[in-house]
Amino acid sequence: MGIEDQRTTVYKVDPAHPGSETLPTLRTEELLLNMGPQHPATHGVLKVILELEGERLVKSTPVLGYLHRGVEKLAEDGTYHQFIPHTDRLDYVCAMYNNFAYCRAVEKLMNITVPDRAEYLRTIVAEVQRIIGHQFWIGTQALDIGAMGVFFYCFRDREILMDWFDELCGARLTTSWYRIGGVERDFTPSLIEKLKQFLDYFPPKIEEYKVFLETNRIWVGRTKGVAIISAEDAVSFGLSGPPLRGSGVDYDLRKAQPYSAYPKCEFSVPLGKNGDTYDRYWIRVQEFYESLKIIRQCLEQMQDGPIMADVPSVTLPPKQRVFTNLESMIQQFKLFSQGFDAPPGEIYCGTEAHKGELGFYIVSTGGGKPYRLKIRAPSFIHMGAFDHMSRGYMISDAVTIFGTYDIVMGECDR
Amino acid sequence: MSLQQLASRLQENFATGFVKAVEWRGDLAVTVTRDRLHEVAQFLHNDPAMDFDYIVHVSSVDWPDDEERFEVVYEFYSIKKRQRIRLKTRVPESDCIVDSLTDLWKGADFMEREVYDMMGIRFRYHPDLRRILLPDDYTEGYPLRKDFPLRGKGWRDTFEFLDETAR
């Protein structure tokens, strides 16, 4: 019996209520349950209205917007450079990738080519961020469904990379290290040394996480065969990242539309088979290995060179010169107060963040501010499939189901 | 199929509804009239040569000076053919409603609700057109319209402050 059949026979609500004829006096009615917005497993402020029949979910309606800050409107009020710190606050556990996606979109609008070394630096940091994101997901998802131990192990290793970020840019979460046309500063020898140490340190730790979870019968029971979505539905709902690849759809922007230093690296895209939570977990674990592979290749291939594109009308001058040279100071001041003159037009640029496709659609009418900036946030779009994926499951599985998207409300509500 | 071929194919099939096709920075944007939008989208979704099975985003732009004020923007992607297309249509303010594409792409449900919430464009045949990010009882309009103030509504100017210099 396939997993899909199992689900229909075991989990699906039978409208005819078999057995109810023997219990004629049993009164049945649907129960409405508000889950959230302050539920600890919702990773922020998410409310879901669950319609229950017994303990089974009949319908669930996500109520979003508790963290809505109007970031898209704010973007219209600032210059392109000024928006970079706002992108940190979208998906606040993985700020680097948001910076990356946004800078790439503006570079596409301005038609800027980023120098080679900067591309390698960007790719390395993006992959480090992907590792952090997946560690965070594995830890908290297991915590949400009761497997507490692995959380501490994931966060112990995440802390090493957080310290690494701290040394790189002075911040752990709201990093703002990417710049339009390049990056803010180069790696120091100590950073490269620490990263190399981490590359050797981490693989045995992945095995540790795997032992913790895959030998935990309760965790396996609560993820295998839960929140199944077929490949057609996943595509139709616009899922991306591990939720899409877990259903076996080969769609990874790093391969489909290669950018940055990814085309120069060899890596594979792991694909799931069953489209359940366990497959999505497996993909994330495999992506640890792929990320380590990419980082190692980038460190080997990276040559010395500039870290910022040489387009003075758009890119920022080096920080050292700003403090010593009048012209550079004026340039920096003008770029931040007035911005650069973007050509009229519109672009969409998607980037494969660890949650899925994070895209920016920018409409420019010329001048220093975007006319309209739309953020394609994977968390928001994944929530659209929540009702479809949760029908027929138990109420306790609701936590697994929104855990499986790796949802962060800052990005979902913007 | 190159982007030009794609655009001319659409122009041939929908001669009456086709407005323009713009290719810029490697993105193809096709504008069609509002009444043909659903047909064009259906063609893009179902035709085996097109096969745009993936919906990327639904967005909207406000052009207050134009006669047809709002622009609804759909972006589709074909996973098999690795191709992108942007489909746009214009709606006037007096009658801002377009046909929903939820029957073709299920993901359009939340995306169209967001456009309705932020820009006030309605979608015909949408199964559940309610506000999504703002509260249901929000009555102050649609925040992404250009006539919605960017820096508050002046309430801040009415606050009374202690005059520290007077002491």
Image (tube, grey):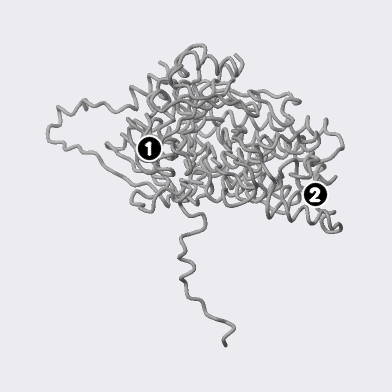
Which residue corresponds to mark 2? A317
Name which residue type carries label 1: Cys
Name which residue type carries label 2: Pro
Expressed as whole percent of the image width and height from the top left, the position of residue B87 reads: 50, 27
In this rendering, is residue A219 above or below A4? below
Expressed as whole percent of the image width and height from the top left, the position of residue B20 reads: 52, 24
Closer to the camera in the image, B33 or A174: B33
Q: Residues within 10 Å of mark 2 (few under 14, many from 20)?
A: many
Q: Which mark is residue A306?
A: none
Which residue corresponds to mark 1? B96
Is residue B154 toward the left or the right of residue A281 in the image? left
Q: Residues within 10 Å of mark 1 (few under 14, many from 20)?
A: some
* Farthest left residue in view: A25
- Can residue A400 be seen by looking at this rendering? no
Closer to the camera in the image, A164 or A356: A356
Q: Secondary structure at mark 1?
A: loop
Is residue A343 toward the left or the right of residue A188 in the image? left
Q: Chain of mark 1?
A: B
